[in-house]
Amino acid sequence: MRNELELIATIEKYLNNEMSAEEKAAFEKNMAADPHLQEAVALQQEVMQGINNLHLKQKIQLARKRYYRHRNLTRWGLTGLVIIITIISILYYLRHHHTYKEKHAVVELNEQGQQQWADADKRLIPQVFVINAGNDTIVETKGGLVIQVPANGFLDENKQPVTGKMELIIKEAMDAASIMRAGLSSTFGIQLLESAGMFFVDARKDGKIISINPATGLYIERPTDTLLPGMKLFKGNRLADGRIDWVNPKPLEQDLTPVDINLLNFYPPGYLDSLAKWGYNYRNKKFTDSLYYSFSDLFLYPSYLEEEGEDVDNTPKYKHTPKPCGINPARIKAIWSNKFQNTLLATREFEERLRYIYKTDDNKVLDLYVNNLDKKLSDIDSMVTRLITGTLKQQFLVFAARHDGKVKISSILTQKLRQYYETKTSIFMEAVAKTNREFWNKQMQMDSLINERQVKHQKESQERTSRLFKEELDLNLKNVYHQLGYDTGFTPRIPTNKVYKVAIRETGWYNIDRFVNEETATRTSGNYTDPKTGKTATIKYQPVSFLVNKQEQFDTLFVYLLPDKLSSFMRLTQVNGRYAENLNEQIKYKLVCIACKGGRMFYYLLSGIEPKVYTEIELVEISQNELTRVLNREGSAQQESDVQKELAFFRFYNNDVKRQKRNAELEELRWRMFPIIYHCMDAK
Amino acid sequence: MQDQRIIELIGLNKHDQALLALYKNFPAVRKMIRLKGGNAQDAEDVFQEALIILCRKVKETEFVLHAQLSTYLFSVCRFLWKDELKKRKKQSVLDFESGLSTMEEQQWEGWVEEEARIGLAEKVVRELGERCREVLLLFYNGGMKLKDIAAKMGYSSENTAKNQKYKCLEAAKNKLRDMKQAIQTI
């Protein structure tokens, strides 16, 4: 065996506690000295636990299967789709009280005071529960029946409530084996039935017959894992030959269990899925709610749809028919609230129906459910089938066939909730429309504000650039004149188009002007030789560039050069991470870098910039006031105010870009969502 | 079945009967989970995980039964479901009164964490080749004799079977170590 495998075998021996005391001590000593061995032991132990777990899971699956097999329905025959649950109630019992409990399954007279007993009566062992008739009692039988006996649930022969101790006697045959052992059959006339169990209920007080109080009734639950549609309750009818025939089928009622309404999903089908698909946080209910409810304004102002049908930038990505059809989100908002906790609406059953209510596009269908909270869900299903046609009608017929019951509710509360629904729906619609309107009006105001400021900033930038250009040109002109030996005592004029035309007649000046102008505009070095004098003049520009450390971490970063001889600043543009410019030989420059990050300011300052590559520029944080002070100290008043103005604009602009982006996304999302809220529209 | 008997059975690795007895508690758990916003599938998942935790704990020597097994099971289920709700970030988790004391909660929390750690090892074993998995399961839980395992798996000798087992264990160990490292680097 390989060494590794030897090691595994040893570890296994250790873990299984199969080592002798000496071996164990030696091994543990080794382990203490060797972290690798420690790790190997730990890993192996975990793997073994993993194997154990896997094994256990298999066993649990097995147990689960067996458990369900025990409880599962017994299905007989092809035709029947019926639960047989027999309530044979109330008996008269004469003398042999004690024997009833013991060996004999039957007493002399049955619950109707007759002597007729079926085979099943004799073969099934009774379960006797002694209960207090004055209390609410719940009993669970061996077969799993849960029987709720309300207080005063039984009446004596004088129709007076029974008090004190009484006996509840149950016989049951819940699975195929016991049904057959009891000699029960499952037929309805000549029809075969499919049974989910049969039971017999009898009650006695001191040996005397007592009857179920019709005003309260007993409530019996037969837990099952699969609910089959169409199950009914049959009454047992003893036949002379000892068989029982099942007659008088009645639909079963299923009382509904309300759950927390906030845990249900009342959104249209596909709403949350689509949000998830598009990468939105579909778990943020505040967001999903506000988006969904925002659609309700179209029910108030359907004309909005026509307006919105044309997209802003004339590229209609989405085209919708201008007619709101679908369930009004305001109605959903009205019902999806704590007011409707513990009502019919706060049930999984209603949640399921709501998915199809959305498909009907008919708010009247929804209204039916909300306005009939005191009715059985299945009754409302039936009402719905009268409103609609086609496959949807089929679906609601299927719902109705489930015989889903109701959630108990007082009629006063029903009334109140109905009113609440009516008023809240319209209030919500108004409110949503108003909020929407106000929001978009505000956005429009902000849009025009940013436009204004943008135009203003552009104008200012242009002014600044041309002022700077003029100043530098003057400087260069003086320099060139000086080099060529001309008089520099006068202020050189600035070439304009008009002057240029005139200047053609004055060769010398014209040439010089053009040269200087060109060099200044492109900020490159150049030589010029005066044809008259033969003298040469030079303007020298030399490249400089700056590399700021970690510039991507800032929201915005501006790199400025402050020229000492000019009144304003130059903002450098960034190319491939570098800020580059050409330095005029005659001017001294200072470098100022200013950056913002989430409202915090950072800066860097360096004087005496030379034509070279600057790297490792590290910005440090600075307060707004301090920055103003620094700029005042380092630059001229004009430079300082120009820089501040520009910074203020960009701060404002960057914030607004975020706002615009958010709005555009919102708009886009609304358009995409339209077909899901109003799915009769076609999305293009 | 008596709790003591169930514990005995689990200790003897006779899980089948014990689990079936424990499964009788399922309806109550399902009811609780339905009331707390879950569905039948959630109930199954939670219940099965709780069974695993309980079975492992019962086997540990220091396990002392302070209450009925069903109470334990129910309270582990409550804890697991609360944990799950927290993961799903349902708002109502705040209202979920687990009805457990802080001490109990802490205990369950420890158990559940341990379970997650073992879950990783289990995943590794589950994802081994089919033969490896089978060999390991037979060796460590089937209570089968070496000879029978060799015959069942079609190995020529007991030694081959044993060797095979060690090789599979090695593969599982390596995989588990890799996975743990990968998790750490993340």
Image (spheres, grey):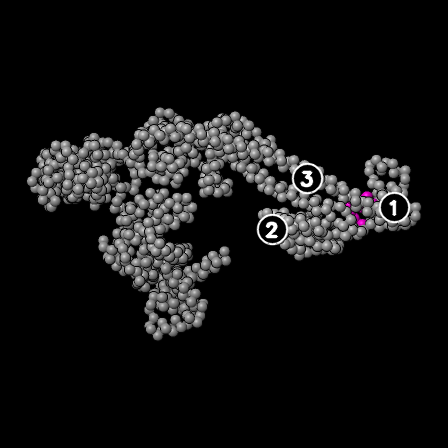
What subunit carries mark 3?
Answer: A
Q: Secondary structure at mark 1?
A: loop
Q: Residue at x 91, y 49 (%)?
A: A534
Q: Is residue B185 above or below residue A19?
A: above
Q: Are marks 3 and 2 on the same chain?
A: yes
What residue is shown with label 1?
Answer: A489
Residue A331 at x, y percent in the picture: 42, 31
Task: Rate crowding at label 3 as few (under 14), some (14 to 19) or many (20 or more) other CA atoms within 10 Å.
Answer: some
Instruction: Specify the segment rendered in magenta.
Output: A516-525
Residue B38 location, quadrant: top left
Does A500 sit left or right of A185 as displayed? right
Separation of residues labelled 3 and 1 (CA atoms): 36 Å
Q: Is residue A150 above or below residue A476?
A: above
Q: Nearer the viewer, residue B160 or A291?
A: A291
What subunit carries mark 1?
Answer: A
Residue A408 at x, y percent in the picture: 29, 34
Separation of residues labelled 3 and 2 (CA atoms): 26 Å
What residue is shown with label 2?
Answer: A553
